[in-house]
Image: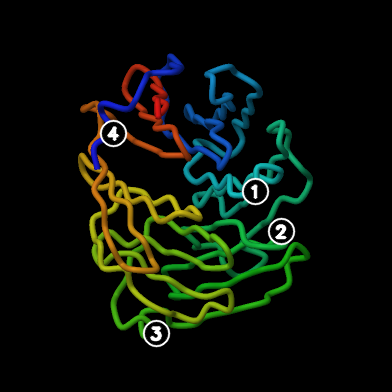
Amino acid sequence: MSLAQELKKSAFVSGEFDMLVTDHIGRMYLTQGHELFLYSEEGKLMYQFSDLSRGEIEHLDVRNPLKLLLFYPGYGQIAFLDNTLSPTLDIVELNRLQLELAQLACTSFDNGFWVYDPVSFKLVRFDQGLNITNEVDNINMLVGAEIAPVQMVEHDSWLYMNDPAHGIFVFDSFGTFTKLIPIPGAKYISVRSNGIFIELAGKLIKYDPLNFQQMEIELPIDNYKEVRIEKKKLFFLTDKGVSVYSLTK
């Protein structure tokens, strides 16, 4: 699938950023050490957030734009921000939940969240009151492999764990393992209603979970650090900033 002839550069955000995340309406969340910036799809700075007490931002989940999840694995803490990047009061101390060695976290339906601890091989879901709703022990035995996931995301009550060595492990809302999408090597995955977008080295794959078809999306530029896709826009993070391209038809 070639998009090069149908794309037009529509916005640019200048800066040296560490990470790019986009939400379902095309807004950009950019990190720079301990700072977080929210830009509109037109490239206008809307809000920013900074917290020196927890170090650099490593994991950011914007599935719910009204309640963003920031995970600091080195501190064992999960923080939440509202849609203006203002901190809320519900800081989660994972050591109090016996998950101080957790390495992944993501938001879940009804204001819940998932946490994965690779030391105990445990996957746990909490509701907004910090009550355990689902718990999966010895996940390695469950999936039949020694996994080392680098990303976890929920969409439509399905949980996806990206393990570059094996592919994408898919679990239902109860934590029951359902299948493996055998596409290894993913740097990042975005799960949307029209498919799963998988960023590999130098290319973007669209995977249809209904018919198992894969489509490679030919990208218009090289030398980017990260790429994201939202509806009819492509976002490229480079050393100089973020370039936004829109489909012309």
- Tag 2 and tag 1, C-beta contact below 8 Å: yes
Q: CA distance from mark 3 to mark 2?
A: 26 Å
Q: Amino acid at mark 3?
A: Leu
Q: Hey, what amino acid is under mark 1? A: Asn
The crowding category of the residue bearing disc 4, from other C-alpha atoms within 10 Å (few below 14, some 14 to 19, many at least 20), is some
Residue 142's tag is 3
Give the residue drawn at x 73%, y 72%.
131
What kind of element bears circle 1?
Answer: loop
Badge 1 local density, few (<14 within 10 Å), some, or many (20+)? some
- Asked if 38 appears above or below 164 in the picture, the reply is above
Nearer-the-camera pick, 125 or 57 = 125
Q: Is residue 217 above or below residue 170?
A: above
The quadrant the C terminus occupies is: top left
Q: Is residue 75 left or right of residue 187?
A: right
Q: Amino acid at mark 4?
A: Leu
Q: Closer to the N terminus: mark 1 or mark 4?
A: 4
Which circle's residue, 2 or 1, is located before the other in the chain?
1
The kind of residue tagged 2 is Asn
Residue 111: mark in rendering:
2
User: Which residue is labeled 1 in the image?
Assistant: 64
Left or right, residue 197 beside residue 49: left
Label 2 CA crowd tier, 10 Å (few <14, some 14–19, many 20+) = few
Q: Secondary structure at mark 4?
A: loop
- Examine the image and state in which quarter residue 120 appears: bottom left
